[in-house]
Amino acid sequence: MKILVTVIALCLTLASSAAYADEKSAADKAATKADAAKTEPAKTTLMPMFKPTNLGAPMTRLGGATRSATGPVPRTEALVPEVAGHTLQAQPVLYWYLAGKTDERIDFALIGVDPINPMLEVTLKGPFEPGIQRIRLADHDVKLLPGLDYQWFVRVVPNPDQRLYDRVVGGGIQRVDPSAELGAKLAAAPQGDAHYALAEAGIWYDALDSLSVQIDASPENENLRAQRAALFDQVGLEEVN
């Protein structure tokens, strides 16, 4: 009987030792994995690279004055390259930036082949919060034709009776047809990655819109914001965020 008790006790001791060893091994593996995660280099975000296809073309980006008779006007910028940006869309989205809140009147105009008769002139609905703003041409029932040059303007009007103090920004835009290579890249691009191919092909407006729509859906996504900031940096708009 004593021998049986001794054997049982020995078995329990061995089982306990084995369980402790397994637990220690698992804990050691977990610690090693955690240490490896700490030392593993952070993954870098692939940035889009904007490659304009019309280098040497006339500059079309327009800036404006910084002050008005009624006081300082928030800084505004047309979010465009220095030369005309391209789009694949008949009704693209245009982006501009406002550095501060304002309830001043802001007008928008789109000029086509005939600069004397604008395609569109409209007062935008305010008041305006600071940040990146957008104008959807689809909201105004106008379409761009392929191969034609257009110019658009955003005009801050602090004093309608003294237009000398207007602040005007704007940029050029041209609708183009996609090349076969770009069409294939867009068809094969994973969801959410179209802006890489668009930027590389010089399609500024659509690349910016693709990124901005994704940021609207995921406003806390710092990677997307970094990618959009990289686009701005590449066209000399480093101060826009």
Image (cartoon, grey):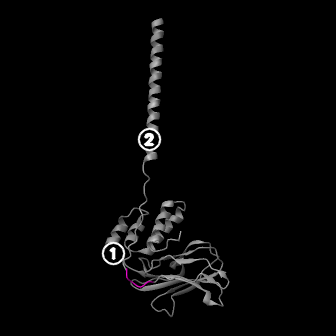
In this view, which residue lies farthest toward the top? Answer: 1
Give the label on residue 33, or none: 2
Judge whether residue 1 can be spotted in this image.
no
**Residue that appears at 31% across and 73% down:** 180
Q: Position of residue 235 (x, y in %)?
A: 45, 74
**Residue that appears at 58% across and 77% down:** 75
- Circle 2 SS class: helix
- Name the residue nearer the viewer: 51 or 18: 51
Q: CA distance from mark 2 to mark 1?
A: 47 Å
Judge whether residue 227 can be spotted in this image.
yes
Q: Position of residue 158 (x, y in %)?
A: 64, 84
In this view, which residue lies farthest toward the bottom? Answer: 116
In this view, which residue lies farthest toward the left? Answer: 180
Instruction: Determine whether 139 is above or below 49 in the image.
Output: below
Instruction: Determine whether 22 is above or below 163 in the image.
Output: above
Task: Give the residue pinned by disc 1.
Answer: 179
Q: Position of residue 66 (x, y in %)?
A: 59, 81
Q: Position of residue 1 (x, y in %)?
A: 47, 5
Question: Which stretch appears magenta?
Answer: 55-59
Within 10 Å of disc 2 (Cα), the crowding (few <14, some 14-19, many 20+) is few
Within 10 Å of disc 1 (Cα), the crowding (few <14, some 14-19, many 20+) is few
- Circle 1 SS class: loop
Amino acid at circle 2: Lys
**Residue that appears at 45% across and 85% down:** 150
Magenta span dominant secondary structure? loop
